[in-house]
Amino acid sequence: MEKEAQIQAKSIRHFTIPKFAMPKMRHLLLGLFGVCVIAAILWYMAPYLRNFFAGNIPAISAEFTEKDLTANVGDEFNISMQIAGKAVAFELYLNYDGDIVEYLRDTESNSGFTQVTTGYFIDPLIEEVTDSEDPNSTQKQLHLLIVSQTGQLDAIQFNLAFKALKVGATDFTKDEKSMIAGKNQDGSATYFELPPPAVLFTNVTVVEAEISPTTIPTFTPTPTPSPEPDATLTPTPTITPAATITPTPTVTPTPDPLAKRGDVKLVMNIKLQGVTRKPADAYIRFPAKVILSATNDQYKKEANIIFDAQDNGQWEGKWEIADVPLDLTYTVFIKGQKHLMKKICDANPKEEISGQYTCNEGAVKLVAGENRLDMSNIYLLAGDIPVQDGIINAVDVVYVRNNFGSLSSEKVTRGDLNLDGIVDTQDMVLMLKALEFKYDED
């Protein structure tokens, strides 16, 4: 018995759990620090890893919901479009036959644009119908520019209202100028290619409405008695006057309008839309392209002029030009680095509402020496931001909208329209106002 107990004790000692040395506190702290570093790196890299595994930003696309529609003469109908992806802005040029159908904005004050996804887009910034440049064509083009409040939904739908005018058929096709915009990874605007017109289209056939036949009553007409003829009157013969001899006019020689010349100095005062006082020192010099053009292009000169900010909110620029014809009348064109080109025909133009001054023929007279052109009672409209293309469009609108609050030098240089050092809603308001005019004047 005693021998068995000794054997059992020996077995227990053989399988006793070994003792391990306890780690030092320094090693525990180093391990914990390493775990934290790895977790921080993974947290920081998470967005980039998601983009890596997800690929590029999903493309934004647009398509008509139906390829074929039928409408009765006189009926109103909708053309519907769906946009897939987080669209920020959509500039649509839609071609159709204006003899067959008409866009309801043609004849009514209300918009023809409605949203199935309510409130995603603000009211259209541009909604206009233009005729074809070909006088023999019945084609018309709807130009629509819509901008999103948020740009966050993956799928949206909107309708365009038309009215059927007469029997026939027309294709609704997207013009190649159409653009759709979304956000890039850094929040800036990026543009997505739309399908070609041969793919992005819908067809509408207009037919006569079915009318139930009705019985038309017949009647017998009562003959009207003919009046007795009057006695025939003998006409009085007319006397032909003798021909008069027209004297040959004396030809007066026309003076040469280019003969009288002189050196001139233009002192020009202008105002910029949204800039009501002298800005900070960083913005007190304003470069602009100025063109002096005589009627019928008999003389033309162009230069880049620096306008300096004045305490009263005006900007003054000076331009010295040698050997200028003095017997001609001139038009002045001014285009700022973020502005639409303004055509000015008068030495002292005025307007009641900003942007409404327009003119046709130049009436600016020049003399040798100093000529003051006070153009401070009209405004250069802001919105055609660099890189300039002579038009305010979705590219400009989306850039300003996507950079709200930005103070970066590059973005302020492009998108700060009122020269207060930040891109914000005030700049967007100025741009939306200028969208009423949209194009350079020439």
Image (spheres, helix red, strand yellow):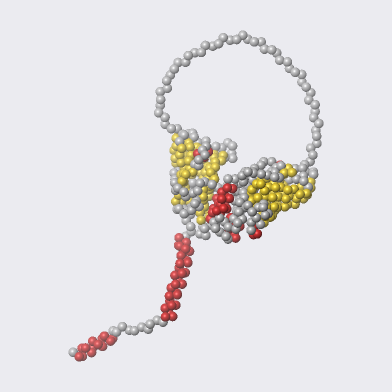
Q: Can you see residue 172?
A: no
Question: Residue pushed farthest front?
Answer: 312
Question: Residue pushed farthest bottom?
Answer: 2
Q: Residue at x 31, y 83 (%)?
A: 17
Question: Residue pushed farthest left?
Answer: 1
Q: Is residue 441 left or right of residue 211?
A: right
Q: Image height check: is 107 above or below 242?
A: below
* x, y percent for residue 369: 78, 49
Q: Residue at x 23, y 88 (%)?
A: 7
Q: Residue at x 68, y 44 (%)?
A: 349
Quarter of the image with the N terminus is bottom left
* x, y percent for residue 28: 42, 78
> How many numbered discs sit on the rendered protein?
0
Q: Is residue 333 left or right of residue 130?
A: right
Q: Is residue 184 left or right of residue 250?
A: left
Instruction: Identify the image quadrant of residue 400.
Output: bottom right
* x, y percent for residue 406: 56, 59
Along the line of sight, the residue nearer the viewer: 96 or 88 = 88
Q: Can you see residue 230?
A: yes
Q: Image height check: is 312 above or below 357?
A: below
Q: Image height check: is 380 above or below 24?
A: above
* x, y percent for residue 64: 46, 45
Along the line of sight, the residue nearer the viewer: 167 or 158 = 158
Q: Residue at x 44, y 80 (%)?
A: 26
Quarter of the image with the C terminus is top right
